[in-house]
Structures are given as structure tokens and as C-alpha cells.
């Protein structure tokens, strides 16, 4: 079977170096798309889809999610960014750039007649040593995670986003929100659930007028104006069915001889509906939220009872409210006897449910939840593009704070970790007498793509800055100088400085996962030496 020739099956086959070069080119082209958006002075991308919807962002995961990539190796990198976003929330651009650089350097080694298996084992050895070195030498020793450290981590994550200039304001808001949703599991572990922080966007006013609300807010209003706007000591019924007038099922025929019987039939329909509503109200519910509709007949009973009813709520919102208030999302009221009943145990509890006007519309707030404290951030801004980008940035920042709180470890940012690892791995490679030595040196060189890209995006002399940075780390490791290991780039002034002192820090897990994911992605693509592409089957006319 010749390279690129026809197979016995209906398709084409490519093997060896051709496939590796193709995969490397696909990975590099994807990395080049996001490369210029890395760092605090990175540029934004404008993406326009088939319908004409515009997205303006510099978030690597969002850019790669919106790209429609056909090449299999390219898809691996897009999935890699999504995985980093899901696991850590930040560092999605750097993980793609690093994976593409590892792949490019691995491909060069293959061209020099080094077997892919040796390269892969070298990369894995380098990764293991890098992770060990980060945990032992590069993490900032903290007895207790102070609020100031969290603010520093949040501001570092925010500096590369659109809301960088207002990082102080948003960092405080995000840190407060994350600390307030602290939850202890039955096994004693403490977690900070990201979903307990709800972000709502409202047009108008300046971004500095965004607020954090102690409670869970949903973008819905009271179903009728006659209902109260505030209910204290709320008992919340969360429903996933229609509250409408009871009607006979389709296909049911009722023969009546007297018009009065028809009136009685209609009255009975009304009574069944009334019994259903009374059953909910008797359980103690004074706030009713449903994912479906509520008709006028049912609204009448709720208004008379002085309860708040909210219709067309999002199912995800109700699930989160159920978790926060200790309630249950009810799918049906049917019991085992064929009747309908509402169990008071299904109700959630909160100190207050109220409707407040924000911008052009109203929001419904659930405050003082009994199970977990929920938080809501109401974002204000001039237009849709701005609000979308602020929301994406804030989700990244909240994830960074969550990971920092849960792992309790920080490292210096601004290329400090990559430069320190590069110097250390080159020394480590020289202690090995095996064939993995070459690939570990290439791994060390590949890590410098991050500080180099940061400097290039900031319109600084990348070659000189990276050389100074490496020299500082080499001196620090040789003479065991503590503060030298935190040396990173100051991209505004174009100098090398101690980034920990200046508050440029990241969660250590972000770097560790980034290295792991980038290495695994590069290894996955390097292993491929054969690509068989089947022709699409022709449909019979």
C-alpha cells in the first residue's frame, strides 16, 4: 500500500512523516490564532458566526469553542482548552500554546531520526520532574490563605481581561462572593461551589455600578401585580408542571341532557383546580415558582392568599434554589392513592423573597437560604458585547479563587514558573545518560514560549527579556536565593522583577494542570503515524 494510495477499503491512507507534519501544522495554526491574546496586554478577537452573531473576547476557551475546526489534531487542542477551562477556569490560552510548541519540537526530533517512543518517555519524565519541582520549590509558602492573597490571584487573572482597569473593584466582589458560598460536605471536606454564584446581566449604567447581592436572583417577575413584592420567612414550592384549569383529557366524551349538568361539569373542573392550589397553600407555601405557566384562575387564588407566584423560571435556576433552600423540585403532585397532595417536606426555606427593579426589568431575589448561602452578582454595562465579556472574565476569576481556596497554594505569575522550570529541566537533563535527554531539553526550551509570547504581545524585546529572566533564575537556583525564584516579567515597564512582591500570583494547580494537559495532548498527537480517511458514503438516488 503506497503512502497516500488507495486502500482495499473505500478511503485514503497517509503514513509517517507526512501525517506528523500535517498534525503539527494544524496545531500550530490553532495556537497562532490565540497566541496574540495571551497576557495582560493581549489583543481581542472578533468572531462572527453563520447567523451574524458577533463575539468579542480574548478568552482562549471561548475562541476555540466558537471555531469550527475540521482537522482531528486541531480538535484535540480545542478539547484541551475546554478541559482546562472546566478543571481550572483560567490558563486556557497558555495550555494551547504550550501543547503546540511541544508538538513542534517533538516533530523536529522525529526528523532527526529519534523514535517517537523515546520523545514521549522523555516528555513524561520532564513533566513528572516539573510537577515535583513546582510543588517543592516554586509554591509560595502560606500558613493560611489570607484575603489579600485571594485578591492578588483574582487581579492577576483579571489583568488580561477587558475588566483589567477595574480589577480592584471586581476582585473584591468576586472574593466576597466565593468566600460566602463556603460549604462543608458530610465527610468534612470544604468546597466552594461555583454554581452557587449566579451572574445576571442588566443593561445600562457603568460597570462600576455592578453589585453583589447576598442571595440567589433569577431574571423573572411576579405573575400578577396584585401580589406582594416582599415575603418574609418564605416557604418556597418549586414546581415543574403547569398550574392551569383542569380539563378533561382528549378523547373523553361526556353526554349531557341538561344544560345545568354542563355547568356542574365546568364547576367541577374549577373545583379540582382550586383543590390543587389549596393543597399547595395548605402545606405552608407562600412563594410558588414553576418552570411552566400559571393561568388567570390559579393566579386569582394566589393573589387572595397573599402569596408570590413566579412562572417560566429556568429549570437550572430552580434546581440551584432547591439545593440552596433545602427544597425539592416537584414533578407531579399525584400520590399512590390516585389523588393529589403536596408534602410540606418538599418546601424550601429562605428568610426573604422579594422583587426589585434593576435596569429595564425586575429581578426576583431569594435571600437568606437555609442550606447553602447563594450569591448573585448583577453586572451593569453599556452593551451586550461588553456584558458577555465581563461575565466570561468573572467566571474565570471565580474559578481561580475557588481553586486557590481549595488547594491553598500559589505560585508567582508573569512567566516566573516557566522560566524556573526551563532552567531546572536543562540541568536535570544533563544528569541523565539516556536517550530521553534530548527530549527533556526540548521540553525545557518549549516552556519558554510562554514568557516569549507575553513579551512579544507587550511590544517588548522578547529575546533580551527572556535571556535576563533565565539568568536571574539560573543564579537563584545555583546560589539558592529565595526571592530569585519569583522573578517574572513586568510587561508595562519591560523589566524583570519579583512578581510575588508586586502581587502577580496564580493558583499552583493552574500551572500543574496546564503542564499535564499540554503534555498529554502533545503525546496523543505525536503517537499518531498513520491516518486513514474514509470517503463519505454516497446515498442512493
Image (cartoon, rainbow, N blue to C red):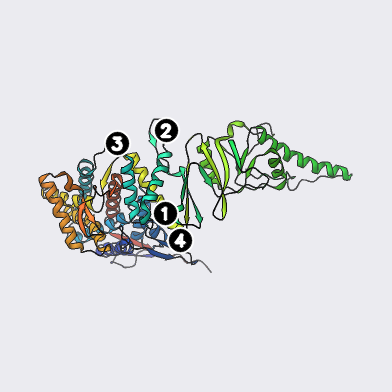
Residue at the farthest bottom position: 541
Q: Residue beneath label 3, please?
A: 144
Q: Residue beneath label 1, please?
A: 392
Which residue lies at the image location 69% right of the left edge and 47% below the top edge? 295
Foreground of the two, 212 or 442 = 212
Give residue 127's position: percent from left, percent from top. Answer: 23, 48
Q: Which mark is residue 385?
A: 4
Mark earlier in primary sequence (4, 3)? 3
Label 4 sits on a secondary structure element that is helix
Whether 92 is drawn above or below 146: the answer is below
Could you give the CA–CA distance between mark 4 and mark 1, rounded to whole angstroms? Answer: 11 Å
Mark earlier in primary sequence (3, 1)? 3
Q: Residue beneath label 2, please?
A: 185
Could you give the CA–CA distance between mark 2 and mark 1, rounded to whole angstroms? Answer: 28 Å
Report the mark closest to the observer, 2 or 1.
1
Report the mark closest to the observer, 2 or 4.
4
Amino acid at each position: 500500500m503506497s503512502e497516500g494510495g488507495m486502500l482495499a477499503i473505500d478511503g485514503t491512507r497517509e503514513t509517517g512523516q507526512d501525517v506528523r507534519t500535517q498534525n503539527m501544522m494544524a496545531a500550530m495554526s490553532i495556537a497562532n490564532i490565540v497566541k496574540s491574546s495571551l497576557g495582560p496586554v493581549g489583543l481581542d478577537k472578533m468572531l462572527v458566526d453563520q447567523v451574524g452573531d458577533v463575539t468579542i473576547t480574548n478568552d482562549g476557551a471561548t475562541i476555540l469553542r466558537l471555531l469550527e475546526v475540521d482537522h482531528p489534531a486541531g480538535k484535540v487542542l480545542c478539547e484541551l482548552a475546554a478541559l482546562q477551562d472546566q478543571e481550572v477556569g483560567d490558563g486556557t490560552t497558555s495550555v494551547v500554546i504550550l501543547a503546540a510548541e511541544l508538538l513542534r519540537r517533538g516533530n523536529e526530533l522525529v526528523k532527526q531520526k529519534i523514535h517517537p517512543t523515546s520523545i514521549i518517555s522523555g516528555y513524561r519524565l520532564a513533566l513528572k520532574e516539573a510537577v515535583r519541582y513546582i510543588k517543592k520549590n516554586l509554591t509560595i509558602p502560606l500558613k493560611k490563605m489570607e484575603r489579600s492573597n485571594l485578591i492578588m490571584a483574582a487581579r492577576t487573572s483579571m489583568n488580561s481581561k477587558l475588566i483589567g482597569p477595574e480589577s480592584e473593584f471586581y476582585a473584591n466582589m468576586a472574593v466576597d462572593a466565593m468566600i460566602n458560598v463556603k460549604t462543608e460536605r458530610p465527610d468534612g471536606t470544604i468546597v466552594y461551589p461555583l454554581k452557587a454564584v449566579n451572574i445576571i446581566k442588566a443593561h445600562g449604567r457603568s460597570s462600576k455600578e455592578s453589585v453583589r447581592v447576598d442571595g440567589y436572583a433569577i431574571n423573572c417577575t411576579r405573575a400578577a401585580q396584585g401580589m406582594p413584592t416582599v415575603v418574609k420567612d418564605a416557604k418556597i414550592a418549586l414546581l415543574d408542571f403547569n398550574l392551569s384549569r383542569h380539563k378533561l383529557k382528549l378523547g373523553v366524551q361526556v353526554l349531557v341532557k341538561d344544560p345545568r349538568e354542563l355547568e356542574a361539569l365546568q364547576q367541577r373542573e374549577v373545583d379540582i383546580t382550586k383543590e390543587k392550589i389549596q393543597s399547595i397553600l395548605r402545606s405552608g407555601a407562600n412563594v410558588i415558582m414553576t418552570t411552566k405557566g400559571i393561568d388567570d384562575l390559579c393566579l386569582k387564588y394566589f393573589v387572595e392568599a397573599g402569596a408570590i407566584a413566579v412562572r417560566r423560571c429556568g429549570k437550572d435556576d430552580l434546581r440551584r434554589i432547591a439545593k440552596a433552600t433545602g427544597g425539592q423540585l416537584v414533578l407531579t403532585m399525584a400520590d399512590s392513592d390516585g389523588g393529589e397532595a403536596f408534602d410540606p417536606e418538599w418546601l424550601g426555606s429562605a428568610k426573604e423573597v422579594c422583587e426589585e427593579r434593576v435596569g429595564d426589568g425586575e429581578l426576583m431575589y431569594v435571600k437568606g437560604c437555609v442550606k447553602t448561602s447563594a450569591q448573585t452578582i448583577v453586572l451593569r454595562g453599556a452593551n451586550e458585547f461588553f456584558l458577555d465579556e465581563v461575565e466570561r472574565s468573572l467566571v474565570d476569576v471565580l474559578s481561580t479563587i475557588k481553586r486557590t481556596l481549595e488547594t491553598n497554594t500559589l505560585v508567582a505569575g508573569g512567566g516566573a514558573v516557566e522560566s524556573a522550570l526551563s532552567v531546572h529541566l536543562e540541568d536535570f537533563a544533563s544528569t541523565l545518560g539516556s536517550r530521553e535527554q534530548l527530549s527533556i531539553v526540548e521540553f525545557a526550551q518549549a516552556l519558554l514560549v510562554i514568557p516569549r509570547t507575553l513579551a512579544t504581545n507587550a511590544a517588548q524585546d522578547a529575546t533580551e527579556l527572556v535571556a535576563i529572566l533565565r539568568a536571574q533564575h539560573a543564579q537563584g537556583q545555583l546560589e539558592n536565593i529565595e526571592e530569585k525564584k519569583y522573578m517574572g516579567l513586568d510587561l508595562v515597564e519591560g523589566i524583570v522583577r519579583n512578581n510575588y512582591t508586586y502581587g502577580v500570583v496564580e493558583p499552583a494547580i493552574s500551572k500543574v494542570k496546564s503542564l499535564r494537559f499540554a503534555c498529554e495532548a502533545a503525546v496523543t498527537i505525536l503517537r499518531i503515524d498513520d491516518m486513514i480517511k474514509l470517503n463519505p458514503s454516497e446515498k442512493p438516488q
